[in-house]
Image (tube, rainbow, N blue to C red):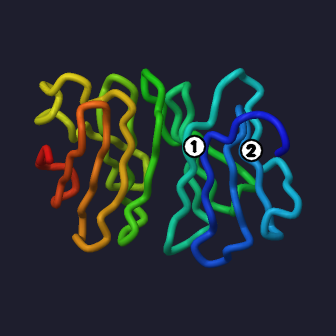
Amino acid sequence: LTTGRIGAIAVDPKNKCIIYAAYGNKVVKSLDCNRSWFDAYIDPRPKNVTSIAIDNLNPLNIYISTDFGEIIKSVDGANTWTTVNRFSKSATQVIINTNSANILYAVVLDQGIFRSDDAGISWNSISESIKKNKGIFTNQRLAFDNSVGDGVYGISKYGIIRSDDGGQNWEIL
C-alpha cells in the first residue's frame, strides 16, 4: 500500500491486528497489524470500493459498498463475497448498527439514506423528510450514536442531521 488512494479502512472490533482497507477496486487485509497485506476482494470491473463495515457482534460479517451501487457481504472474514443489493447509483457508504447486526444503513448518491432491517436483503428509503433541503445528499456520511439505541448522525454539504429513531424522523442541527 505504498501508492494510490485508500478509500476506506476498518479494524476488526475484536482483534486490532486485523485491518481491512479499500484500495481502488479491491479490499486488502492485514492479519499482522499492518506488517503485510493480501487481497481479500478484487472486482475486475473499474470501480471503487467506497466503504467497509465490520459487524461488532460477529467480525466475520463484513459489508462493503461500491461506486457501482452494490452492497457486498462476506460472512467468513472476507474469504468469499456475495452481492446482497444493487442501487441504481453509487453506494457511498454502508454502516452496521452497533447493537443489532441485521440493521444496516446505506448512503446512495443523489438518492438519500436507506435502511435494511434484514441484513441487506431489502432496503427502504428513510430520507423522505429531509429531501427538500438542498445539498443534503452531497458528500454525505453517517455514524451511529451509541448513547441512543437507534441513533444516527449524518453530515453533508447541507450540515448535520440527527435521528434518534433509526431514521424515521430527522432533525437538522
Q: What kind of residue is marked 1? A: Ile
Residue bearing the label numbered 2: 41
Q: Report whether 60 appears left or right of 27.
A: left
Q: Tell me residue 3's x, y (percent).
A: 82, 36
* Residue 98 against residue 162 in the figure, above or below: below
Q: Report whether 65 appears left or right of 87.
A: right
Task: Check if mark 2's residue and mark 1's residue have beta carbons within 8 Å.
Answer: yes
- Mark number displayed over residue 72: 1
Q: Residues within 10 Å of mark 2 (few under 14, many from 20)?
A: many
Q: Tell me residue 40's x, y (percent).
A: 77, 50
* Residue 98 against residue 43 in the figure, above or below: below
The quarter of the image holding the N terminus is top right
Q: Tell me residue 20's x, y (percent).
A: 69, 56
- State the count of labels: 2
Report the residue at 30% width, 31% height from top: 157
Q: CA distance from mark 2 to mark 1?
A: 10 Å
Q: What kind of residue is marked 2? A: Tyr
Q: Report whether 133 appears left or right of 117.
A: left
Q: Report whether 38 appears left or right of 72.
A: right
